[in-house]
Image (cartoon, rainbow, N blue to C red):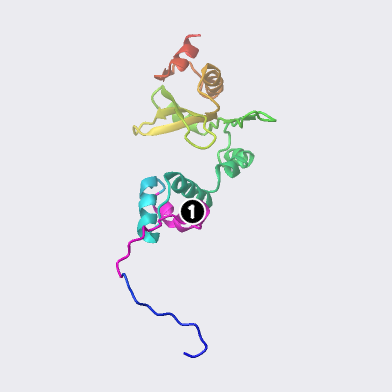
Amino acid sequence: MKNQDTWEVRTVKDKHSCSREFNNKLLTAKWLGKRIESKVRENPNVEIKQIVAKVKEKWVVGISKDKASRAKATASASLEGSVEEQYNYMNQYCAELLRSNQGSSVFLKFSWPPEFYNESIIPRSRSIIPRFEICRPIVGLDGCFLKGYYGGQLLTAIGRDPNDQMLPIAYAIVEAENKDSWSWFLDNLSRDIGSRGITYISDQQKVCDNFIC
């Protein structure tokens, strides 16, 4: 072609010998979180390694477990709302408990300004008391760790109804499981259901110490 630049190929090596790049900076945790919402909705307990494998299979891109974890957290927050936003509705939640379960006892306590965020709540419905009167006079007490962003402990009091089914009596979210929190929980519980003639069962040493003291 006259007056134009041209190229002439003389040798072709048709076997690819360069290493392939599996990383892509455009695949961010935020971008990925939106794409895996349906998967997280179907299975909220989807494992991080499954997300990593899915990304490699679908987009042929390698990601770290940390990025997959952040993407899952983004998807969960989009589907369920963030933990921080949900804690902002604690006052409304308490009001709804009192409205829908008339006669309940609800306490909310928090420190301000917080050195760390701390809220405690103990709902107990007096509508449960008539049912509890025909239950076995036994109350099970237990506590467990909350694995969310803010942590804390969940304290519970459970009874057994005549059909041998569990009857939730009271629960509380506290900053730590210690003698003070159990004492506070049990003092409020005994005001509603009493303590005379009731057997409390627990494998928690702090609970036993509280009763002994």
**Is 131 above or below relative to 177?**
below
Residue 65: image location, x then y, percent = 42, 45
Q: Secondary structure at mark 1?
A: helix
**Is 41 above or below relative to 94?**
below
- Extreme-bottom residue of the structure: 2
**Is 90 above or below relative to 114?**
below
First to last magenta residue range? 14-43
Q: Which residue is mark 1?
A: 33
Residue 160: image location, x then y, percent = 38, 29
Identify the residue shown where x is 55% and y is 27%.
Answer: 175
Number of numbered discs on residues:
1
**Residue 206 covered by magenta stretch:** no
**Residue 42 covered by magenta stretch:** yes
Q: In the depicted view, which residue is nearer to us: 169 or 52?
A: 52
Q: Is residue 108 left or right of residue 143?
A: right
Q: Residues within 10 Å of mark 1 (few under 14, many from 20)?
A: many
Q: In the depicted view, which residue is nearer to us: 20 or 78?
A: 20
Residue 76: image location, x then y, percent = 49, 49
Identify the residue shown where x is 37% and y is 77%.
Answer: 9
Q: Locate residue 144: give its quadrant.
A: top left
